[in-house]
Image (cartoon, helix red, strand yellow):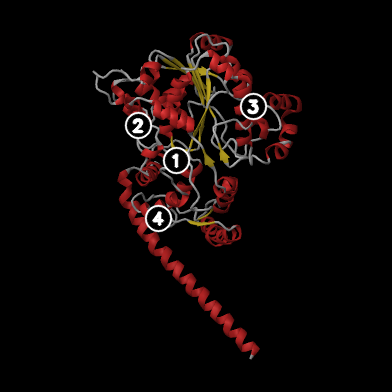
Amino acid sequence: MAMSASNMHVDETPSDLQNFYRNKTVFVTGGTGFMGIVFIEKLLRATEVKRVYMLVRPKREKSADERLAILFQNTLFDKLRATGVNPTDRIHPILGDCNQENIGISPQNRKLLINEVNVVIHLAATVRFNETLYKATCINVRATLDLIKLAKEMKHLEAFVHVSSAFANCVVHSIDEKYYNNKLSVSAKKMCELCDTLGFETTNKLEEALCKEYRNTYTYTKALAEEAVLSEGRSLPISVFRPAIVIQTYNEPLPGWIGNLHGPSAILYASGRGVLRVMFMKAYQRAHLVPADYCANLMLAIGWETAKRSKQECLKMAPPIYNYSNHDDNPLNWKQYISTIEDYGYEVALTKMIWYPFLITVDKKWLYLLLTVFYHTIPGYILDFLLVLKGKKRRMIELYSKIEKQSSALDYFIMNNFEFTMENTMALWNSLTARDKELFNFDLRSIYWKEYIQYTLKGMRLYLCGETPDSLPSAKKKYKKFVILHYTLTRLLFVGLFLLLWTLLKTFFFLIN
């Protein structure tokens, strides 16, 4: 049983949240993504949910069942499988695609969802900052509108949780749990109509004008999706979840599990390999990071809370919003996060590192550009030259170009200070029973950041780099060699620069005398 998989005694009475999800049918979009996988694992392990319908994009080379079978072989599900539960027993794929009209669901599957679904968790989105405006609108906005339309037909719907982003409304720096539709120049429906009328190329030409204040198509279309929830979904039992930057799991089901290479995890990975050495950021700015397993727990709690709203409350009040970000009582800054690379780099050394891992952070653009010449560009050309000598393809300068492009996209969010209020989130936490708080913990004040960041480093090594513990001794030897080489080279460069400067000064004084 799922109950035994959640570390409970058999004689314990199910909690409020477990009682709510027992025998429920849940429809999840974005379930194959990082946060979606963590959510589904917790749902299956901690509740006796009846069935989970999971939106899966069709692919020619593999059927939906084959894709799910591969997905559930992931080590993330080991704890669940150890209880005798097979994840695929309660998971049923629904072929569809958020890039298509009506999310690409067949009439038969649409009817199935209308008749059976109790809870909708809408996680699907394109998270690429540089996605075209047309495609981002289709996936993030139109799919939300289509799903709301479908939800209105669902006969047994009790809760709909729309997953947004804490930075969807980045046009303001102090973000409350409210809607900021006044910052948008068009509505969600109007934007979709524009896409239909103008087509792919012309719509994309509007990107600079429409998205300028939002910095990219991702935040702009996520803001439009929130407007869709308010304008089209308020008759539904629906809520908006706004997580900040979601990173590795803290505790469940594995410490430090990560399923993709995005955001801060990509920074750690690139730095851990000795590739990324300079970052443009304000090191003492608040790092709005949240663990994926805490997000999964909060989503489950939001679904339970949303189902308690009456039809009258849904019609009279705007759908509630739950901000989720770094808590004032347990703050974390970027310096604390990044310093772990140097503090624990040796303990999680990578066999694939190409140099001693370190990271310099600067908050002056001119200094950042100067340092990248010495720490990225020049070493990049040297390494590319060595690769050519070995008969291999040059790749370092191209890699640094990609790093610079991705870093530039993050500048606005790292260099500016954002504050988030979390009254609804904290009120929800305070409303839970002691048992639910233990089973579905999302209290950010309970995180021991130093320990957690160590988990993220170990998780990066194991789950992203695929380096098992038995490779650590050889990686540590390599680390020590690079330390010696790094400091030797650094000192030689300083001596060389000093001698060059001394020679120039001597020449200068000789000439004027």
Question: Mark 2 falls on what kind of element?
Answer: loop
**Which is more N-terminal, label 3 or label 4?**
3
**Which is more N-terminal, label 4 or label 1?**
1
Question: Mark 4 falls on what kind of element?
Answer: helix
To which residue does mark 2 refer?
253
Question: Mark 1 falls on what kind of element?
Answer: loop
Residue contact at pointers 4 and 2, CB within 8 angstroms = no
Q: Residue at x 56, y 37 (%)?
A: 175
Q: Residues within 10 Å of mark 4 (few under 14, many from 20)?
A: some
How far is the residue under mark 2 from the one under mark 3?
A: 33 Å
Q: From the viewer's perspective, is the residue at label 1 or at label 4 nearer?
A: 1
Q: Quadrant of residue 259?
A: top left
Q: From the viewer's perspective, is the residue at label 1 or at label 2 nearer?
A: 1
Figure quadrant of the C terminus: bottom right
Q: Which mark is residue 327?
A: 1
To which residue does mark 3 refer?
138
Q: Residues within 10 Å of mark 2 (few under 14, many from 20)?
A: many
Q: Amino acid at mark 3?
A: Cys
Q: Residues within 10 Å of mark 1 (few under 14, many from 20)?
A: some
To which residue does mark 4 refer?
342
x and y percentages locating residue 265 in the rendered image:
46, 43
In the image, taking residue 254 as reference, residue 372 lies left or right, namely right
How far is the residue under mark 4 from the one under mark 2?
A: 27 Å
Q: Is residue 105 visible?
A: no
Q: Amino acid at mark 4?
A: Glu
